[in-house]
Image (cartoon, rainbow, N blue to C red):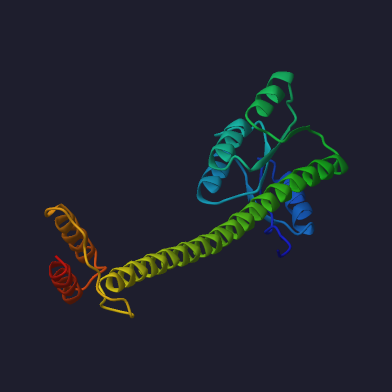
Amino acid sequence: MKNVVPEKIRVIVVDDDISILRILKQLLKDKGYEVITASDGKEAIELISNSDFDLVITDLMMPKSDGLEVLKKAKNKNSRTQVIMITGFATLDSAIEALKLGAFDYIRKPFKLAELNVTIRNAVDKIHLIKSNEMLLKHLKEAHQRLRATVDESVSAIEKDIEALDKMKKDVDMEVLRAEVLNKYGLVGNNVPFHLKHEGESPILSEVERLSRLYEKGVLTKEEFELCKKTLFEAM
C-alpha cells in the first residue's frame, strides 16, 4: 500500500484586530498553510459556508457575529474541523461553552507566539491524523472491495465447476443406466435377449412403465424405447 500523504492544511483566521490578522496570517503562511482571513464573524461564517477549512482560529468577541457563532458554523459544516478560540475577555463560562461546542483549545490575549505555535501544531497534528486515518480507511475499503470481487469470482468459478461435475456425473449415470437396459434387452453387447418369467400381466406392465419413465427422463431414445418394448413383448 502507498504511503498516505495528507492534503495541504487550509486555515481561516478571524479577528476584528487587523494587526493580529496580519501577524497570524504571516505566521501560518511561513508554516506552509493556505490562509484566508476575515475581519468579523459574519464574514467568517459566509466564507466557511462556501468553502472547506481544516483549522479555524477565531477571536471570541467580535461585531456582527461572535466567535461562538463561528465555532458552531464550522463544526456544523464539518465536525472534523479544529477550532482555536482567542480572546481578551476570557471567563470560565465562555471557555466551558466553547469546549462544549467542540473547540480544540482556548487561548487568552495577550498570547505568546510560542504558546500559540504549540496549540496550532497540536491542532494540525490532530488534523493530519484524522486525514491519514480517513485515507487509510478509504484504501482499506478499496482493497477489501477488490478482494471481495476476487473471492466472488473464485466462488462463482468453483460453483460452475461443481455444476459441471454434477452434470457430468448425471450424464455418466444416465449412460450407465442406458447401457444396462440395452444390454438387458440384447440391443448392445453379446447378451442374448432375456425371457421374462411372469404370471399374468403385472411384471410386463411394470417393466413397460419402467421403460416409459426412462424414456421420459431421456435415458432412452424413442427408437431404443420401441425396440425394448418389442423385445419385451416378444419374450412373453
- What residue sits 68% from the left and 33% below the top? 103
198 vs 124, left or right, is left
Q: Is residue 63 visible?
A: no
Q: Return the x and y of residue 26 as percentages of the image width and height.
A: 76, 55
23 vs 233, left or right, is right
127 vs 220, left or right, is right
Q: Please state, as top left, top right, bottom left or bottom right, where the C terminus lies in the image.
A: bottom left
- What residue sits 27% from the left and 68% below the top? 219
Q: Please state, as top left, top right, bottom left or bottom right, where the N terminus lies in the image.
A: bottom right
Q: Return the x and y of residue 152 as percentages of the image width and height.
A: 50, 60
- What residue sits 65% from the left and 48% below the top? 54
Q: Return the x and y of residue 184 as percentages of the image width and height.
A: 29, 70
Where is 178 relative to 135, above or below?
Answer: below
Where is 149 relative to 42, above or below?
Answer: below
Where is 150 relative to 60, above or below?
Answer: below
> Foreground: 94 or 4?
4
Q: Return the x and y of residue 145 as percentages of the image width and height.
A: 55, 58
> Foreground: 211 or 12?
211
98 vs 163, left or right, is right
Asked where in the image residue 150 lies, by quadrant, the reply is bottom right
Asked where in the image residue 196 lies, by quadrant, the reply is bottom left
Q: Is residue 139 visible?
A: yes
